[in-house]
Image (cartoon, rainbow, N blue to C red):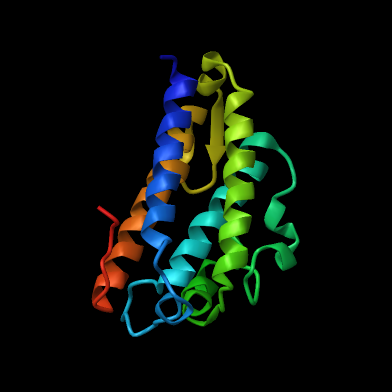
Amino acid sequence: MNAVTLLREQLKSAHETQEATMADVTEQSAHFADTNKALPVGGAYAHSIISEDVVVATMFAHTTPLSTDNSLTGLSEPMPSMSDWDKHEAWYKTVKVDLTKLKEFAQKVYLATDDYLASLKDEDLDQEIDMPGMGKHSLAFFITNIVILHIANLTGEISSVKGLQGLKGYPF
C-alpha cells in the first residue's frame, strides 16, 4: 500500500466513525449547550466539516471551499474564519444546525477531499507548506494532523457530549 492510499483509508475511517457517531443525534441533542467548555454536538460536527472543506480547498488544492455558499451547509450562520478565533466559542454555542442538510453537505466535502487525495502521488506528500502559527511541515503532516486527527478529536468530543446527555457516544 502506498502512502496516499493509506491516508485515503485513514480519512475514510475517520469519516465513517464520525458519521456513525452522529447517526442517532437529534436536533435537540445537537443543540444541547449545557457543556461548560465542551463544544455542543452540532457545533463540533459543523466545525469538523467546515474546517476540512476550508483547509483542503484553500491550503492544499488551491480551490474555492464548497462552504463559501453558506446556504448549502445547513448552518444558520457561517463559521468564523480562523483569523477570528475569538468568535468561535460564541458561534459553537449559538449556531443552529439543520442536521439533514449538514450531513448531505458533509458527503460532498468528503468526496472533494478524497478526489483531491486521489490526485496526489506519494512524492507530493513531501511538499513543504508554511502555515502561520504551525511553521513549515510536509503536506503529509498537515493531512494527518489538521484533517484526519482533527476529525477524530472532534468525534471524541461529540461522543463525550452525547454522554453528558445520557446518550450512547461512539456507535461501538
Q: Quadrant of residue 51?
A: bottom right
For residue 64, say whether it is visible: yes
Asked if residue 36 is positioned above or below residue 134 in the image, the reply reads: below
Nearer the observer, 20 or 64: 20
Q: Is residue 43 above or below residue 110?
A: below
Q: Which residue is depicted at the point 34% across and 53% down?
A: 153
Q: Is residue 150 visible?
A: no
Q: Residue at x 54, y 46 (%)?
A: 132
Q: Position of residue 122 (x, y in %)?
A: 52, 16
Is residue 113 shown left or right of residue 39? right
Q: Residue at x 59, y 63 (%)?
A: 102
Which x, y percent locates residue 156?
31, 57
Closest to the observer, 40 or 29: 29
Measured as percent of width and height from the top left, residue 96 is found at: 56, 79
Vertical order, 103 against 30 (above or below): above
Horizontally, residue 149 falls left or right of residue 116, namely left
| Residue placed furthest toward the front | 24
